[in-house]
Image: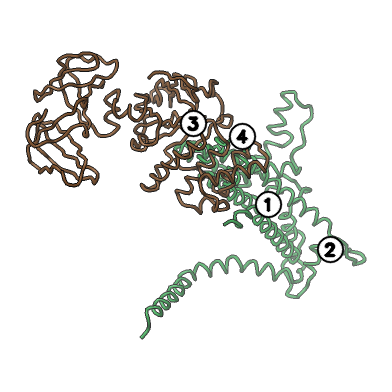
Chain colours: A green, B brown
Amino acid sequence: MATAAEIEKQAEAREIRNRWYLSAPALIIILLAASGPLLIVLLYSFLTPGPYGDVVWKFSTEGWVSVFLERDIFDDTLSFASAHLTIFWRSLKLAIMATVATLIFGFPTAYFIATRPERTRDIWLFLITIPFWTNLLIRTFAVLQVIRNEGLINTALINLGVIDQPIQMLYTDFAIMVGMVYVYLPLMVLPLYASMEKLDFRLVEAGYDLYATRWQVLKRIIFPLVRPGVVAGSILVFIPAIGAYVTPSVLGGGKNMMFANLIELQFGQGRNWPLGAALSITVMAIVMVALLVYVRNTSGSEVRHG
Amino acid sequence: MPDTPGKNAIEVRGVRKVFGTGEAQVAALDTVSVSIRENEFFTLLGPSGCGKTTLLRLIAGFDFPSEGEILLYGSDIAPLPPFKRPVNTVFQSYALFPHMTVAENIGFGLEMLGKPRAEIDARVAEMLKLVRMEKLAKRRTSQISGGQQQRVALARALAPQPKVLLLDEPLSALDYKLRKEMQIELKRLQHETGITFIFVTHDQEEALTMSDRIAVMSSGKILQVGSARDIYDRPAVRFVADFIGETNFLDASIDSIDGGKAKVTLKSGATISATVADGFKPDGDATVVIRPEHAKAVKGKGDISGVVENVVYFGTDTHVHVKLDDGESFTVRQQNTRGAMVEFERGERVGIVLGDDAAQILKD
């Protein structure tokens, strides 16, 4: 005869088994859809480039070597691949700047929405999401119309007599920044709003009551309490920003390449799929490490006191 | 209310507060004036929506008056933001900072005032001792009980040594026994710190047991200010008598008035004497107010009579609900004693004897 404890144990084991069975379809899809393509990319990075693109099934580490080093065409010596580093550095710099800029613009926006009466908050949120209705490419071309030499800003400034010559904004890093901030701002505002909506504004009053000025209340009370939203928003903006392709190719022109454009080049005109695959994995690894460090640092105190 | 000698900590002068605009305009406070003395335990008492919390928020600085002045030791603080007022608040929800420890919460106000670290630490330790929370200093505020959170909220508000402490229904979230304990605790703290307390509550028992003086509020107005005794024994208007304690109301016609005394005839034909509230000149009909404990039910004839409808035992006393011969309801409260108890049965005819000074005539 099984004791009550044994029966309970069996029931628990059955429960756990059932949970696995039930989640199996989802797990299989995640495994195939997420890991499958990644594994293919990893495999390709160790093969030899074919003459017209594609790969030849022959093992080679040349793709990985070319990520960091350059082989001289004439004497076959290796030198440091500074072009790749420059492009990567630009991507990282622009992605960080875009994240910070969306945070600076998004924080007051989210605060504004969260402090509206409940009825009108939905309307404001709806307005924030409107740009999502239009294709990314179209939105990017709209930004181009605003900042190009004959565009809205320059024409207005010239007609007002502020400047004689148009300011060159298009095809600069600034243009890419503007485009990315415009495109990714909702991704920052929405998670920020989600955590600010949960914020107990009586705590803000308590802060004022205890002699904290507006700036101190923001720094000591609001910011620490909405930090989960800041972290989530930063990640949501940073990841697509560092991998941005459309925005830099439209607004940055040919010379201000970002990493995604470099990868695309290897799979397209460059006909070097293994290098493209190796570059993809490199940037993925760096982004993952950067995010781990960031999350660890920004939410560290929460975890410690948990 | 006569203005008293001694310093006033807070003077509210002709304060109006209007919310909304146009058609939807609501006057939460309608030209309120009141003086609160130094070192006083002052209570704003009234039903929800009477404007007591609005008045507290105006003193704290979370809202600004539409009209009028609020003086703190003689200087107008009405236009100042809350962080420039030497006034602290204990919030109904406590509003403790969840991302800080108990000690960090208590030290926050001092830190914002720019006090040196050593002074903050010493003061926090002192406050923790005052509210008996020394052992929990390093805890997060989410890891302590409701009663403990209440103590931390008090310590946090007292730490910067405010001139006036505002308490917004701070005991309403606690259970009965804890509430009783905290009532005594609050009185002790007020006594030990010597800070003026302004306490908001809708609980008349809380107000009566704790306060030096009480302001009874209704619909944005202060109806009466006085000691617990004044308010209970000499209510100025009918609302105050009705809101504080239980009261019997009887219709009567006035026969004669002489000074503060009147002779009235009740509907039943009985003639009794009643005191008339100060400065009130009733003519013809009036409402007579009689506290249940100032009347006595007897077997046989009394001043008025009726039939017992219900007898409710409350432990310390018994309430006898009587339907009077003229159809009105009347409650008598008798103290329970061992032995000499007069028992009443439902349906029994009883007489009600009204003590001297039991009946009062009030303004509506």
Q: Which residue is mark 3?
A: B196
Q: How many marks?
A: 4
Residues marked 1 and 2 touching at CB (< 8 Å): no
The residue type indicated by label 1 comes to Ala
Q: Secondary structure at mark 3?
A: strand
Foreground: B225 or B71? B225
Label 1 or label 2, whichever comes before in sequence order:
2
The residue type indicated by label 3 comes to Thr
Q: Residue at x 80, y 53 (%)?
A: A86
Q: Secondary structure at mark 4?
A: loop
Q: Secondary structure at mark 2?
A: strand
Rendering quarter of residue B333? top left
C-alpha span from label 1 to label 4: 40 Å
In the rendered image, is residue B25 in sight? Answer: no
C-alpha span from label 2 to label 4: 54 Å
C-alpha span from label 1 to label 2: 24 Å
Give me the chain letter of mark 4.
A
Foreground: B127 or B299? B299
Residues marked 1 and 4 touching at CB (< 8 Å): no
- Give the label on residue A244, or none: 1
Give me the chain letter of mark 2.
A
| Tag 1 and tag 3 share a subunit | no
Q: Which residue is mark 4?
A: A213
Q: Which residue is mark 2?
A: A69
Task: Please tell me how crowded label 4 is: few (under 14), some (14-19), or many (20+) other residues with Cα within 10 Å.
Answer: some
- Relative to A17, say whether B293 is above or below: above
Q: Secondary structure at mark 1?
A: loop
Q: Quadrant of the N terminus of chain B?
A: top left
C-alpha span from label 1 to label 3: 62 Å
Q: Residue at x 36, y 47 (%)?
A: B176
Foreground: B211 or A67? B211
Q: Position of residue B127 (x, y in %)?
A: 55, 43
